[in-house]
Amino acid sequence: MRTLFIFFVAGVLTATTSLLLAGSGFGQALPVVKINAKKAALGKRLFFDERLSGDGALSCASCHIPEKGFADGKPLSSAYPGTEGFRNTPTLINTVHKKSLGIPWFHDGRIGTNLNDVTRDQITETIWMNMDMRIMQERVKQDPVYRKMFKDVGMGEPSNGKVRKLIPEYLKTLTSRNVPFDQGKMSAAAKKGEALFKGKGGCAQCHNGPLFTDGQAHNLGVPENQDIFKEPLRHITFVAFNMFMGNENFMNLRRDPGAHVINHYADGRDMGKFFTPTLRELKQTAPYMHNGMLASLKDVVTFYNKGGGNDPNKDSRLKPLGMSAQEQANIVAFLESLSGDPLTGPEHVYGESISQKYDPIPNWLTVEN
Ligand code: HEC
Ligand code: HEC
């Protein structure tokens, strides 16, 4: 009896928690976030500054490109010079909302607490910007423009901790604008598509809430991107990542383990699961899925209409849908109605090239900046 009671209580708790998660409603407005405009402007300069990477070759914007919806338009990302990436670059538009909605970051959900940690990961990891935080701090301190900007926002001297707060302040400015769905300005086809999305298509089971994601990981049987295993520079990055993440048998892996990285279940039930991404701004961010295997929204809908791919762990909700070509086109129209204006104006893009012409500080190790 007591055990039953405990199970009952646990059940109620789980049900309550999942109601509180992103999953609950459908397509609500995005949460409003408070932005400190001056700090965001400083964060913007840092986001576009190549000096934040080890050899000065990459800025955040090298991979999160404004004209490509802050993704990069490629199936698999590039990486630090001399290597190549093995996952699709996600959009950064609306990424700031993940925190309040309880959705973790990265395709495999490996960082769930805050954007400050994600920013540190992107700057310091060998495969991304390969930067030592102490060197970064000194580089920023050498630049008189930064010294002035840090003082003006009341943050005193530049430091690596402050950089990791300021970039997320800029990321707060990257949120959807003028989205037909939010404005109730959808075409007739898109409206039909919305009904199919919630009904026959079964899409809203996983794609709901303000970002159209349940914040959970699922296996859809998306085919592996064989370039990861055929191209040595990608494969070496993939192997190194899996080794550092403690994934078993990393030398022989021939699939991306995805969210397995979180719990490493011995029976492998978490293998090949990826977190449900946002469906906002898809018009700007082709190709799709964690490995860029689906080139267009039409391809994505065809994939679901067939019941997804093949995988022993495939989510049981994916079944052939039997939708006509017209119904599929309506779903595509609905997906397109979730995209708003590109964020490519001066508010979001640091227009001028960042000047690196300044005299070094004499005795910089001993003087106060
Ligand atoms: C070399 C390309 C590259 C560079 C440079 C880069 N990123 Fe990324 N970024 C990626 C890729 C690829 C992912 C997805 C990785 C994964 O899921 O395993 C990602 C993921 C992210 C995410 C998680 C998004 C989400 O919704 O899950 C954030 C936030 C992010 N990057 C911010 C930044 C910031 C800030 C910088 C600069 C400090 C930066 N990135 C530099 C390629 C890059
Ligand atoms: C079982 C949960 C589930 C269902 C049902 C589902 N999706 Fe997804 N969706 C996901 C997951 C998980 C991903 C990411 C998979 C990956 O990265 O490999 C995804 C990815 C996508 C993407 C690609 C987004 C991007 O940026 O790469 C689109 C578009 C999409 N789904 C639309 C739909 C539509 C339309 C339907 C209904 C026909 C649907 N989904 C049904 C879970 C689901």
Image (cartoon, rainbow, N blue to C red):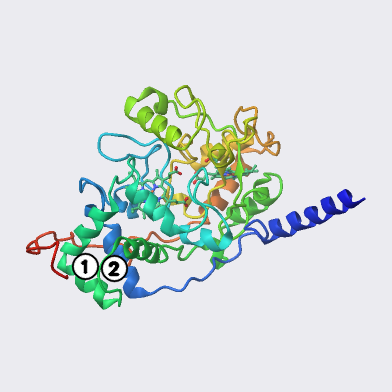
| Position of residue 62 in the picture relative to residue 76 (left or right) | left
Q: Residues within 10 Å of mark 2 (few under 14, many from 20)?
A: many
Dividing the picture into quadrants, the one containing residue 274 is top right
Question: In the rendering, which numbered label is found on residue 207?
Answer: none
| Residue 240 picture location, percent across and down | 39, 32
Q: How far, Cα to Cα, is label 2 from label 1?
A: 8 Å
| Residue 316 picture location, percent across and down | 70, 36
| Position of residue 352 in the picture relative to residue 225 (left or right) | left
- The residue at 26%/66% (across/down) is 158
**Is residue 181 at least partly visible in the picture?**
yes
| Residue contact between numbered discs 2 and 1, judged by CB atoms under 8 Å | yes
Q: Residues within 10 Å of mark 1 (few under 14, many from 20)?
A: some
| Closest to the observer, 33 or 143 | 143
Identity, as a three-letter code, of the amino acid under mark 1: Tyr
| Residue 337 picture location, percent across and down | 53, 56
**Is residue 92 at least partly visible in the picture?**
no
| Residue 364 picture location, percent across and down | 12, 63
| Residue that extends furthest to the right in the rendered view of this protein | 1
User: Mark 2 highlights which residue?
Assistant: 42
| Position of residue 363 in the picture relative to residue 148 (left or right) | left
| Closest to the observer, 358 or 182 | 358
Q: Circle 1 — which element?
A: helix
- The residue at 52%/56% (across/down) is 338
User: Mark 1 highlights which residue?
Assistant: 146
Mark closer to the observer (2, 1): 1
Identity, as a three-letter code, of the amino acid under mark 2: Leu
